[in-house]
Image (tube, rainbow, N blue to C red):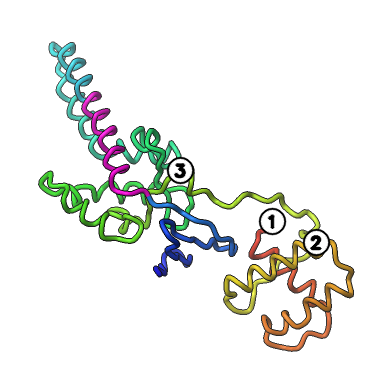
Amino acid sequence: MYDGGMNGNAHTLRGSGISVETPEGIEFILYPAGILVRICAVSIDTLLQWFLMLLSAVITNALRQESYGGWFTLLLSFALNWFYFVAWEVFNRGQSLGKYLMGIRVVQSNGSPVRAPSSFMRNLLRFADTFLSLYAIGLVCVAASPGFRRIGDWAADTLVVYASRSLPPPVRPRAAWLEQFPAITPPRALSYAEKQVILMFARRYPLLGHARAEEIAGDFVNRVRGDRSEGGAARYLLGIARKIGGGIV
């Protein structure tokens, strides 16, 4: 069992996957990419970087008579070393060319798209994983850590996962009828099970009569709110459902 406190989301190892609970109480599975597939991905990206450097040498040779030929090479080398992966990950849904070809991507630890500061941090710390060109540090860190994380991933709160298998939950259409109920913030932090009960009640509400809905909601509202409800229990639960589900149930 692995429970992480990152971003307030629950993380649980399930077989080869990591169960992630979103703030809305929806659970899905991330499948971290292992060492071999990541080595293949970084090898492809390294070859592309070498090709771009070779192209830069050709262009520099053509500009040899110009004073800015050398500056061009230095600037391109700097950009490739520090921003190659960042640019790919931020503007291509967490995938460099190598990651795209190997079917993996970088995401935040809660499964959301990688953010620019996180991408920059994880790639800034590549020097720690490849210190003195010895990749053993990164390999040991990836092999020994839950979710196959290297130092940069821990610092940036990111994961490298299989793109085709680590999918967010399907998006449900917004329940327009729920918008008639004002959003209500729960008086205390709700457990995953409690959130699921409330969202399930909201999904079934249109099929229930008013009296039956009040009957079902009554006892549960008393446990959530901590006092005796004299009516409006269904409305109270629907307000919480709108808050935690964003109007999507």
Report if residue 49 lies within the magenta region.
yes
User: Would residue 54 be found to the left or right of residue 106 on screen?
Assistant: left
Q: Earlier in the sequence, mark 1 or mark 3?
A: 3
User: Would residue 82 be found to the left or right of residue 177 on screen?
Assistant: left
Q: Amino acid at mark 2?
A: Gln
Which x, y percent locates residue 14? 45, 62
Q: Amino acid at mark 1?
A: Ile
Q: Which mark is residue 43?
A: none
Question: Disc 2 or disc 1, which is closer to the eye?
Answer: 1
Label 3 secondary element: loop
Q: Amino acid at mark 3?
A: Ala
Q: Earlier in the sequence, mark 3 or mark 2?
A: 3
Question: Disc 1 or disc 3, which is closer to the eye?
Answer: 3
Q: Within 10 angstroms of label 3, few (less than 14), some, or many (20 or more) residues?
A: many
**Residue drawn at (48%, 46%) of the image:** 165
Which x, y percent locates residue 245? 65, 61
Front residue of this view, candidates 73 and 26: 26
Rendered position, 68 above or below 170: above
Real-space Cα separation, disc 2 to disc 1, in angstroms: 13 Å
The residue identified by callout 3 is 163
Can see residue 122?
A: yes
Rendered position, 89 above or below 152: above
Which x, y percent locates residue 224? 67, 80
Q: Which mark is residue 180?
A: 2
User: Would residue 9 be found to the left or right of residue 132 on screen?
Assistant: right
